[in-house]
Amino acid sequence: MALDLKKLRAGSLINQETNPREIFNLLPEKNPKYQYLRDVQAEVLSHWHERRKEKDLVVKMNTGGGKTVVGLLLLKSCLNEGITPAIYVVPDGYLATQVEIEAKQLGIAVEREPDAPAVLQGKAIGLITVHKLFNGLSKFGVGDRGIQIPIGSIVIDDAHACMSTIESQFTITLNNQHSVFTKLLNLFRDDLKRQNEALLLEVESGDPNAVMLVPFWVWNQQQNEVIKILQANSTDDVIKYHWALIKNFLLHSRCVFSGARLEISPRCLPIEALPSFVSAQRRVFMTATLADDSILISDLNANPETVANQITPKTANDIGERMILSPQVIDPNLDDEEIKRYLQRKAKEQNVVVIVPSNFRADFWRPIATIIADASNLEDTVAKLKNSHVGLVVFINKYDGVDLPGNACRILVLDGLPKARKLIERVENNLLGRSKNIIGKQIQRIEQGIGRGVRGNDDYCVVMLMGSELIQVLYSLEAKEMFSPATRAQLNLSDELADQIENGLDELDGTINYCLSQDSEWKSLARERLVGIRYTETHVRSIAIAQREAFESAVIRDFKRSVQALQQEVNTYAEDDPSTLGWLNWQLAEYTDFINPVDAQLILKKAIASNRRVVKPIDGIDYERLDARGLEQSRSVVWRLRSYKNNSSKFQIDVNGILDSLKFEPETAKQFENAMCEVAELLGFGSQRPENDYGKGPDVLWATGNLNYFVIECKNGAVSERVNKSDCNQLTGSVMWFQTKYDQTSTCIPVLIHPSNIFERAATPAPNTRVMTPEKLDQFKQSVRDFSIAVASKMNTIEHDDVYKILDHHNLTPMKILDCYTVAAKGQN
């Protein structure tokens, strides 16, 4: 009779051992490729085992370092210890399949349903996507339903990638055709009108570029009506998966309208709406080596102390070989079309993957792309790249959650700056501009994107960064310090390479081929630069801790403590960071309104003194005129250049970043308006954004000297073939506004930035109206670029007479700008 050895193993060590390293050795059916743990995996597992009883732990490993194996082994350890059910969470179905394959190869049991008997009995790990846990109808139980499926131990893999989904699940999003959109807009219309009448008209006309935040005091006052409207529609498909998560926290939420949709989202995520997650004994957040984990605190209410005390390997050099190059830094004269043609040639030999921030930008690559990949064809596209030579593939807004090892991606291109996903992000981006708080979030997504093409320490890839906005961010403030140590080392090496490249694309191609051909000298150099690289101490922003404390206190109606938490943070910010100071005071005013509405308005006025882009107080703010009397254009340019002394490269990067924001593209209005102000200052003019900063007036106002002004309306997101009556009236209204704010000694020229200079029959433009069309905008940008190159070549010695000659040569004096880069308005025949 044959022996049944399995019976003898029923109570074996494999189901009793809690040390995950020993569990790995005991696994009887693992694939032969798992002969041993990598050093980095073994180190991390040992550290975790020592600290496993701490509720919140962050595990950080470089991309391709084998996080999945670590996550499966530590959850198997939890199962053996009886901390069950054990749940493994991933961002999407594609990654769930990858984890399932890895678990099968290891011989660790997983189930795709969290309520499967084996999961509930502690015999298998529940493998789910983040949507399955974080939604208003979650099987795990939400809010008043209590715990339906308990969680003992949970791993959230690619935690930062999961966060965008989690945030969207706590957000009600409704398009402008939904009845709730109309009802809420009508409810708040009068108050939005008092904030900015022209912007409200744009929202009502369906302009997706127009974004308006409902003032906090109005939102608080109208809570009963808001709840009635939402409750009546809570079974709608677009609401029901979110309603239970935020219905008890509407008072602590914000409402933002655009012409296309509205969003309602809490100030911080009320994670207590998911009691299973809150009561889990062990929560492990696994992520790549990103420098800022503050979001785990502000959104998931993780413990700040344990988040800061991350678990990492001893060294950070367990990363593949990446040559990271910025062609437009190496040669500022390179344009996007030249780089596209170059990559088209390289794609005949290598798989080239381009990550773009939007569908609009994908259209730039469409003529040469083999595949444009989005959620609908993601898995199929990745499979093709892994199995064959495809050519050039474009991924839309996919900076995380995609593995492209080996020949699947030998050249990776990040084209452009990642865009804000949510309307409230767009509001805060406008408030904070280029502050560290915004740049840190952008760097995080850039680093996630950079990691797509290298999935192991023996892998290699060329990474190209293009787009002036992206380059400008990389070279602003202390942006490089926000990258992980290994990525920072690779960026520094690439900067040294760039210093030796002189002849544009030809020499750049030769440099790239060192990596693609795996030149031995290059490989040695790339490895040497990573020797001794260690993980730096994680960064947890005090702002995130204060925001979470204020929110948690407000939920239990301890508003005094909310105010104290934010006031303490406000006190740490100096006047030299006015954008952040104003942003914080706005949040302080939000919580103060619950205690003392009068004080809240006073704090809001203080916020506006630092940052005019926050919501306006009930009684508004007084307009401060833009003085053009003493302005001398050429002297103003020289003064500005002095701040770039001995750094002409930084000057060129900033100029290219400004000009890159001047483009006809939907949902970029705020960036465009800001860039119009920046280009005015670059050219020696004064500038304002009256509508944005004061709630009335033109999008942009230029003071060009001698009491002359340009009143500018920016319609760079327009798609109509004619200037419609609404856009025309807006420009006319801005001229009338100017006439009420400035006396008769001042004159203004109306300028409309629009795809067409032909006005509809019903539209009557103001006298002397000029139009900057796409063609004229491109000519203007080229002249500004040529001007910047000319002044940069003699930056340290240039005088105002030289500047005037260069301005005049490039037709950038006030009247020449109008003559050369705008056209007359025409009525429709």
Image (cartoon, rainbow, N blue to C red):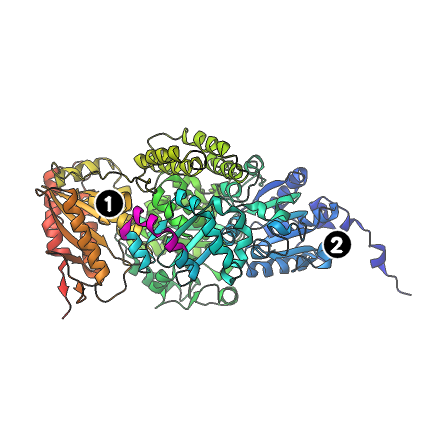
Residue 467 place in picture, x, y as percent: 33, 53
Q: What secondary structure prevails in the magenta region?
A: helix
Residues shaded magenta? 184-198
Query: Within the magenta stretch, is there residue 667?
Result: no
Residue 828 place in picture, x, y as percent: 15, 68
- How packed mark 1 is, by other alpha carbons closer than 10 Å (few <14, some 14-19, many 20 or more), is many
Q: Is residue 752 left or right of residue 533?
A: left
Residue linked to disc 1 = 690
Mark 2 lies on a secondary structure that is loop
Question: Which quadrant holds residue 259?
Answer: bottom left
Q: Quadrant of the N terminus?
A: bottom right
- How packed mark 2 is, by other alpha carbons closer than 10 Å (few <14, some 14-19, many 20 or more), is some
Q: Is residue 405 visible?
A: no
- Is mark 1 in CB contact (under 8 Å) with mark 2? no
**Most distant residue in the left direction:** 745
Mark toward the start of the polypeptide (1 vs 2): 2
Give the residue type that dot 1 points to. Answer: Pro
